[in-house]
Amino acid sequence: MKALQYVTVGAEPEVREIPTPEPGPGEVLLRVTAAGVCHSDDFVMNNPPEQFGIELPLTLGHEGAGQVTALGEGVRGIDIGTNVVVYGPWGCGNCWFCAQGQENYCSRAAELGIMPPGLGSPGAIAEYLIVDSPRHLVPIGDLDPVATVPLTDAGLTPYHAIKRSLDKIRPGSWTVVIGSGGLGHVAIQLLRYLSSTRIIALDVNDEKLEFARSVGAHEAVLSDDRAAGNVRKITGPAGASLVLDFVGFQPTIDTAMAVAGVDSDVTIVGIGDGKSAARVGFGISPYETTATAPYWGARAELIELIDLAHAGVLDIATERFSLDEAPEAYRRLAAGTLRGRAVVVP
């Protein structure tokens, strides 16, 4: 089968022919119908593989959708032919976090060497994908896999981040969304559906700001060295009750902290360079402001998102690429020229 693999440190990923996998006991084989491209992949490819314990070559793609084509010995509860998406942050299934469906925070994953598809285990940008357990599959029925597959990360991650702060974004509050791209444009739609908060989107050019307005932002502000002051002109002295930073570099984190109000949440979702951090302390940050960096979301939250998709709540902007065009999708991702989410269709 064909697969997009990261083969050589510092080089672009390559489309290669590799053996088609067969499911072992407890595993499920999917024929991939769509796979998302994400900044997390770019982050991994720009750092030494040993930093993450990853062996090369690695098939990329941690956003996956497919059709069940074969079941390993002992698999129950899923039928061949079922259309599904893959819950990516795999865990042990037994620890306290996993027992609540929060496999994204599995306490034993590192110890047991469990890694998400595309971020350590073979990923979804291929013709076929092995999923380690049927519990990591969510049926999608007749939903379009191309439009649905970004929900597994670009939807799940902001959904999780927003849900934990719903009590903060009361009517009359302001929420600031920094970065209106793959995750940010989904966050804006979720905020509009889940709350009455008013949304200020920050991004780097007029085209991206207009995109943010088109998906529901009430205000749009250029993300530059004057951004914090311009946001404060809108929010007034109260500041923002919630700030979602989908970029995560030091300038955007500093802006996030500068626009936050008293008793607010600053949620740093973007990976950035993996080194930037928020400054929190007496006289530095607003009183009782919480700064946090979440990771992905729970299995139950992905099921909820699929229900929202069936209800027609979300309109995910996607650009389609064939498997042979997948390297170009990563070039576009790195250049920042994608509108929404890139999806590879084998």
Image (cartoon, helix red, strand yellow):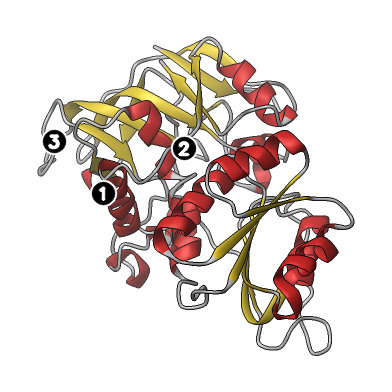
The residue that mark 2 highlights is 62
On screen, 10 above or below 164? above
SS class, disc 2: loop
Frontmost residue, 148 versus 224: 224
Which of marks 1 and 2 precedes in the sequence? 2
User: Within 10 Å of the Cα at label 3, are there few (<14), some (14-19), or many (20+) other Cα atoms?
Assistant: few
User: Within 10 Å of the Cα at label 2, are there few (<14), some (14-19), or many (20+) other Cα atoms?
Assistant: many
Q: Residue 73: give its label.
A: 3
Residue 292 locus on image (x, y percent): 61, 70
User: Within 10 Å of the Cα at label 1, are there few (<14), some (14-19), or many (20+) other Cα atoms?
Assistant: few
Frontmost residue, 105 versus 163: 163
- Label 2 vs label 1: CA separation? 21 Å
The residue that mark 1 highlights is 307
SS class, disc 1: helix
Verify CB contact (< 8 Å) between mark 2 and mark 1. no
Residue 169 locus on image (x, y percent): 52, 73
On screen, 343 above or below 215? above
The N terminus, quarter of image: top left
For the image, the number of numbered tags is 3
- Who's the residue at 34% across and 16% down the image? 20
Q: Nearer the viewer, mark 2 or mark 1?
A: 1
Q: Residue 120: give its label.
A: none
Give the residue type at disc 2: His
Which of marks 2 and 3 precedes in the sequence? 2
**Quarter of the image where one finds residue 73:** top left
On screen, 342 above or below 233? above
